[in-house]
Image (cartoon, rainbow, N blue to C red):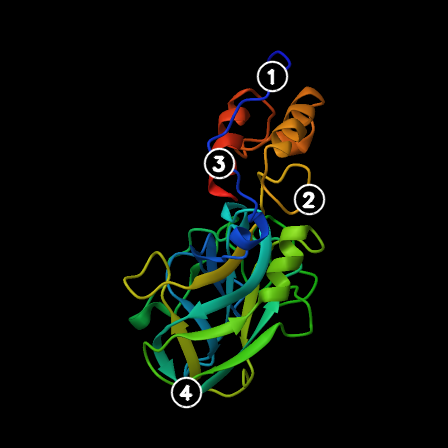
Amino acid sequence: MRGAAVVGIPVFPCVLSACLAASASAQVFELEAQNEATILDVATQAIGDGALFSGTSNNRLTKRALIRFDLSVLPAGDIVSATLELTPRAIRGPVPVSAFRLTRDWNEGPALGQGTGGGLGSLAGPDDVTWLVDGFGANWNNAGGDFDPVATDSATFTLLLTPVGFDVTQDVIDMIDGTVTNLGWILISDIEPTIGRVVSFGTDETPDPNPKLIVEVTPNCVADVNGDGEVTPTDFTAWVSAFNNNLPECDQNGDGSCTPTDFTAWVNNFNNGWR
């Protein structure tokens, strides 16, 4: 419930008129994966707990890696760049790989990677994503996963423990603004039919370098409530109006509600120039 209407305009010790200049300073965020899994072209097998694989191994198992990140932790603002970075923990290559944006939800599942290097799947349970099912009890529309047929980006893995990045900037922008749903990416070898060409990556279940999503964001100038590109005391008047009318601009602490605590948050944002 909102508190009583705010009245009176306080005196602030400074006036920051460089909201746009301050917000032009981008911040870099490194996100760890939220969900990771490998699907194999054996309908009964899955790897939800273990390393990620892309390619076809010597035992003729074709593998595709699925990965998703929680984008809600990023601050509101303009996405400058987004890079999906993966570091090979093992490689029989070189292996060219393309990243495709997934178009159907999936569930990581608990199936444990087996065998030397963890590249053999376990018997899939009802919660495991596999080559044929999404982990929620329904079949993929297409065996091997449902994804945008146009690759987001491609890269070649050649050296062990050497990071390689995929440019996923537009995908992340579209996911954040709601143009598409954030279902992550599937990593498919460009030479998938070639036996013995496969690359694997660490996850939070292995001691190897984890996949990262490196996002550069220019944060919004939250204190600029009236949207004139400057942070001045006139923004306090605009904030009071937003508070009294329960408008989104009132929420300065990002908790999703408009309460008197947002006044303190606005003062902090005012003094910082942006948030």
The amino acid at mark 4 is Gly
- Residue identifier under label 4: 93
Residue type at tag 1: Gly
CA distance for labels 3 and 2: 18 Å
Between 174 and 47, the residue placed more toward the observer is 174
* x, y percent for residue 202: 36, 65
Q: CA distance from mark 1 to mark 2?
A: 22 Å
Q: Real-space Cα distance between discs 1 and 3?
A: 18 Å
For marks 1 and 2, the one nearer the N-term is 1
Discs 3, 4 touching: Cβ within 8 Å: no
Q: Secondary structure at mark 2?
A: loop
Check disc 1: other Cα within 10 Å, few if <14, some if 14-19, many if 20+.
Answer: few
Q: Nearer the viewer, mark 3 or mark 2?
A: 3
As helix, strand or loop, the secondary structure at mark 1 comes to loop
The image shows residue 154, relative to residue 137, as above or below, that is below
Query: In the image, what residue type sits under mark 3?
Result: Cys
Residues under numbered marks 3 and 2 in contact, where contact means CB atoms less than 8 Å apart: no
| Quadrant showing the N terminus | top right
Rendered residue at 44%/69% (across/down): 85
Q: CA distance from mark 3 to mark 4?
A: 59 Å
Disc 3 on helix, strand or loop?
A: loop
Q: Which residue is mark 2?
A: 228
- Which mark identifies residue 8? 1
**C-alpha distance separating marks 1 and 4:** 69 Å
Q: Is residue 87 visible?
A: yes
Pair 1/4: label in front: 1
